[in-house]
Amino acid sequence: MGKGKVFLVSLLSLALVSTASMTAVRTASANETEKWRYFAKDMTYKWAPNFNNTTFKNGWTGAVNSWNGKGMNIYQHSNSANTLGEFYESTGLYGRMTTRYSSSNIVTSFTGEINSGNSNNVNTNVPLSVAVHEIGHSMGLAHNSQNSIMNNERNRNNLYYPTSYDVQTMKQLYAGTIGWNSLTAATEKAPQEETSQINVSYDFPTASTIQEMASEADVVISGEYTSNEYEKWNMSRNPENPLKESSEKYTEGRLYKFKVENVLKGNLSEKEIKVNHRASEMIKVELEEGKTQEVKVDDPRFIEPTAGQKYLLFLKKDNKLNNYYGAIEPFSLIITNQDNVQVESNLVGKQDYTHKFHVSNGLYLETEEEGTVDTISGSSLSELIEQIDLPIQ
């Protein structure tokens, strides 16, 4: 199981609030949590500007209701510092949550977004699953490998609610905080603290079996990249009109030409297609009031393809922009001269995968990934082809 998240750390001197009101109960056998949490169960949100996607709004509303039904008190307020909305990328990303928090690990604001560029997000259950997952991140729940909404390997069609494991984690974070046992909002307000750290966490599908990879993909093909040259473009698009690039964000995509030799799943008549690889993104950082700085973050999943090498690719298609992209991590298998396969992924065989970026004046950006287990490399191509149409166990 993999997870993607970005930390921004600023060395600031901040006032601490009382330890009694800030400390969450944790034990040696505690469930996986992030560093942060809300001050109490109460939290507000508002819709992002120009957010008109009814399906996604229903997803966010359903997610709020799901967590509130388990004990939280999240509600809409026009003056909220927190926004929920959408973004558009030709990528397998389902959603992302940007959580800002103080030196005492209390959330100061968050921004949740669902990716309208992922064609799987059209099913009503899927954006609901993504929204429950992302709000869970803002609350302080972390990725895990349990029967959990926070598991990146979950079936998003079937798991779209907090499980008993998630409720246990929520109570681990919030039981004992101010107002937890009250039927109304806490009377004590959260302290006004400055943001010292920013985390950007992604809901990205991961797989450990060939059946899971094939299930996520629209097409499975073999062939080769015809050149190391690529077309660079802004993957961040206007959700209301994806033919226009975003005016707010830049995400570097690289379009490589791929010669199709065999189609193992899906309908594909083209002999040559463009495959998009997500290379990096620019993240805007607020340094102080009125001032921002953009930080380039290389995508840890990016691997430059090798022209002339035989590949087996698991892809989805962006019909609006007419390109293909990796459906899952991993999405690319190298076919060796012996007709065996080798998983191509930066996340294989690493317990922790960390990148650090220095910004300025004690400001650091850090990306963290959990490694994945490779159970595929060394298998014969013919064995894998037989498994592509098998149901997931």
Image (cartoon, rainbow, N blue to C red):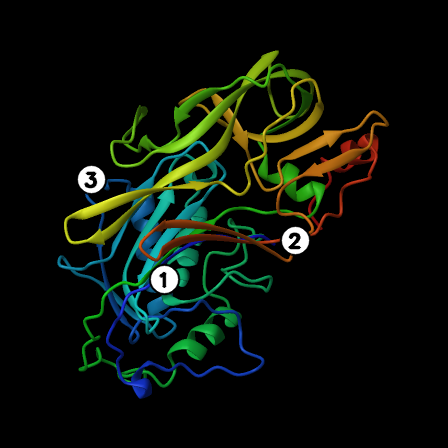
Residue extending farthest top? 271
Give residue 305's quadrant in the image.
top right
The residue carrying pointer 1 sits among few (fewer than 14), some (14 to 19) or many (20 or more) residues within 10 Å by Cα, namely: many
Label 3 to label 2, Cα distance in Å? 40 Å
Find disc 1 in the rendering and name its residue.
138
Which numbered circle lies on residue 201?
none
- Among the two numbered marks 3 and 2 on one chain, the one whose residue lies closer to the N terminus: 3
Label 2 to label 1, Cα distance in Å? 26 Å
Q: Which of marks 3 and 2 is in front?
A: 2
Q: Is residue 275 left or right of residue 99?
A: right
The residue carrying pointer 3 sits among few (fewer than 14), some (14 to 19) or many (20 or more) residues within 10 Å by Cα, namely: few
Which numbered circle lies on residue 50?
3
Q: Is residue 355 visible?
A: yes
Give residue 296's quadrant in the image.
top left
Image quadrant where one finds the N terminus: bottom right
Residue 137 percent across, percent down from the top left = 41, 61
| Foreground residue among 339 and 391 | 339
The relative height of residue 115 versus residue 135 in the rendered view (above or below) is above
Q: In this view, does 82 lie to the left or right of 125?
A: left
Q: What residue type is labelled 1?
A: Ser
